[in-house]
Image (spheres, rainbow, N blue to C red):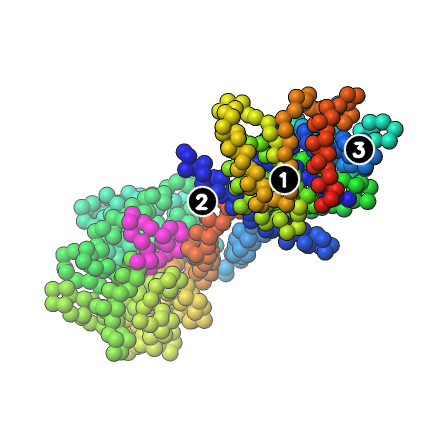
Amino acid sequence: MKTVCVHSYKGGTGKTTFLLNIAGILAKQEKKVLAVDYDLRAPSFQSYFKMTKQSFLSHFLLEEKTLGDIIFPCKIDEKANLDLIFSSMEFLKQHSKQRDKLSRDDAKYLARMYNLQKNVEKKYDFMLIDTIPGFFYRSIDSMMISDIILLIATPSTSNVLGIEELCGNIYTMLQEETKMILVINKIEEEGVEADKEIFEENLVKLRQIGNNKFSEVVEVPYFNILSERIHAFEDQPQEEFLNSLKDIIKIIEKG
Amino acid sequence: MKKQKLDDSLSEIKKAREYLKESQKNLARLKSGKGVKRKFHFLLQENKVLVILLSLMLISSIVLPVVFLIPDPIIRDPMQESVDTTINLILTNFTDGSGLPILNETLQTPSSELLILSSLAYALISQAGFEHDQADFQSKISQIINTLENDTFVTYNNRSEPLSIFYQFLGIYTLLQSKITLPSSSEVISSTMIQNILVKTLESYLSNERYLIIQPISNSSYLIDQSMAIWVLATYKLLTGNSWVHGYYFEDLIQGLLNGVSDLFFNSTYYTLYHEYDHSTNESRNYALVEDLIFFTVALSRAERLSTYFESSSSYYHQQIINNFVDAEWFVHSINTSDQEVYIKNQALFTLISYLMNFGNVGSEVRNEIIESFSMNKGFIEKVGEEDITCESCLYGLVALASTNWSVIENDREYVNMITDATLSPFYVILTPIMIVFIIKIWRRKIVVKRRW
Ligand SMILES: Nc1ncnc2c1ncn2[C@@H]1O[C@H](COP(=O)(O)OP(=O)(O)O)[C@@H](O)[C@H]1O
Ligand SMILES: [Mg+2]
């Protein structure tokens, strides 16, 4: 089993979009995939799927529920199957004690994630983990147990600075054990960042960082896509978008 | 504001790096089949057992010493009869119409000194477990308080004339002992009252230039006054646990007085003490009398319970008294053993201090001599070989009778204060709230760790 996590300096860079769409493509290819929503700060798997169940990753991390309780299969067709572990904003908001515990620098949660990984490693080909953006203990846990880290960055000034920060402090420390891929997601931000010149400047910088510090760099253009959808499962998918994700999948499979 | 944000984010990065380093080690441990190393407070949080154990330890560390140090109940002493007889004798022969003690039948005026002495004697016999008239004792205490004028003890007839320094301090000592004796509900004596009198006395007699008690008019200092001051200050500190009184730090005061004694009353060649120091001629005069030595010895023995220093120990002076003033039959003489003056007062005081200093064998011998004199005369005689019984001699007799049991209680009490207040109290004061907060925090599983998202 390959464990892959998506990380970024800021939110809204396309982590969840890429992760679930990659998961969808792999599932379509009849790979066994487990996608884990570990973005406890802004969990968003739920908006992609209709979920009424009340068992979440946090239950497993806090030893309140077993793995079997929190994994939900999502059947697409006869052959394709995607398994999911959810997190819930609502739930964490209502259970602030649990949320507090989960935010601490307690090594227990690394052990829980490792345990999760060990338990599923025979069943799946891929485990994909969505993470909290930035320097959080739980994002570090996810990165620690991953074989590959997809760092998603948009060419915005703050993201460029953030990536430098992350490279200097976190990624270099992980590099020996982990394959690091920079995914430049060419979506524009509103306001100041809409300035074309700055956008291009930042793009150049990102490419530089990517070439110097990462083993692979992938660029994903902006597509006119519906958000919060798994496009591989759609009847008429946006092929170009899927193709560009397939480039990433190739690198993942190679690494 | 910006700077603050930058500092915050830098510290976040630092935390993240540290966490990552730990996680790398932890992951290696996990891979080799071991568990992760978690931080102590997280472990505690999940082990309520530990919390309960800690709480029990905390509670027992406070409760157990107290339980063990509660003095054993006092078994009724066969000497109760002597006490009863003596109290009756005082009531019939040495008490005026209003219940105040008088010197003798011819001199009918009550005296403040006797009032202080009788209250002290009553307090001690009461603490020693002898039965007596509680109401009578309480009225005496109220009378003492009436003899106060601006926090100073004054003579009974002339309220502008203060008592001697010795009696000022003995008065404070009496109030301290009486406060302990009275039921805690009784508000006759307040702590502030005692404190005010103590401060007033120190302000009136403590020399400005050096820590020394000085007689205002005569320009002399007496060893007995220094001793009384040390005894009272040390007792006050040991019983109340207070370290300060109105800007006076007890241990400094006591050490200062001890230094004064060692400078002005101490003969370093012979290790003997002088009776008096004349500030006008700068000379030490006359060797200390037995009374001087008795009070200095007991004062030093109390000071030794605090962290103070003197040239030689209280037990050394206790032995000196026995060598130089006590004869083979355990009579205490005034100047030396060949001297014929043997007063019950010295006999009683030496009994008292011997017991207090844990020389019970000496105390019982000296006291037995008094009881023998008592049984012959049906009252405590003033001076061995004579027949006079006075109010004062009876009161000292009561003090001697009370000594055995009272000293045990007093020592325990001082000991309790010594460990809980004097040395351990800062420890407890600091530790207890920390522990309580700690336990509550852990109990509610809410250690103050900033949530990081
Ligand atoms: N390459 C892209 N082209 C067009 N829209 C994109 C692209 N990548 C992401 N988006 C959109 O950006 C938004 C934020 O993406 P999301 O995956 O939720 O970010 P994150 O999980 O990092 O917070 C979503 O609406 C998503 O559809
Ligand atoms: Mg997301």
Disc 2, SS: loop
Where residue B36 sits in the image (x, y, percent)?
67, 51
Residue at 33%, 43% (x, y): give it.
B192
- Most foreground residue, A167 or B70: A167
Quarter of the picture holding the N terminus of chain A: top right
Ligand 1 lies under 8 Å from the Cβ of mark 1: no
Q: Is residue B171 left or right of residue A145?
A: left
Tag 3, which chain? A
Rendered view: B3 above or below B113: above
The amino acid beneath tag 2 is Pro
Q: Is residue A243 left or right of residue B68?
A: right
Badge 1, how many Cα within 10 Å: few under 14, some, many 20+?
many
Tag 2, which chain? B
Mark drawn on residue B183: 2
| Residue where numbered disc 3 is placed | A27
- Most foreground residue, A205 or B79: A205
Q: Earlier in the sequence, mark 3 or mark 1?
A: 3
Rendered view: B212 above or below B131: below
What segment is highlighted magenta in the picture? B230-252
The amino acid beneath tag 3 is Ala
Q: Nearer the viewer, mark 2 or mark 1?
A: 1
Badge 2, how many Cα within 10 Å: few under 14, some, many 20+?
few
| Residue where numbered disc 1 is placed | A217
Q: Is residue B400 something that shows in the picture?
A: no
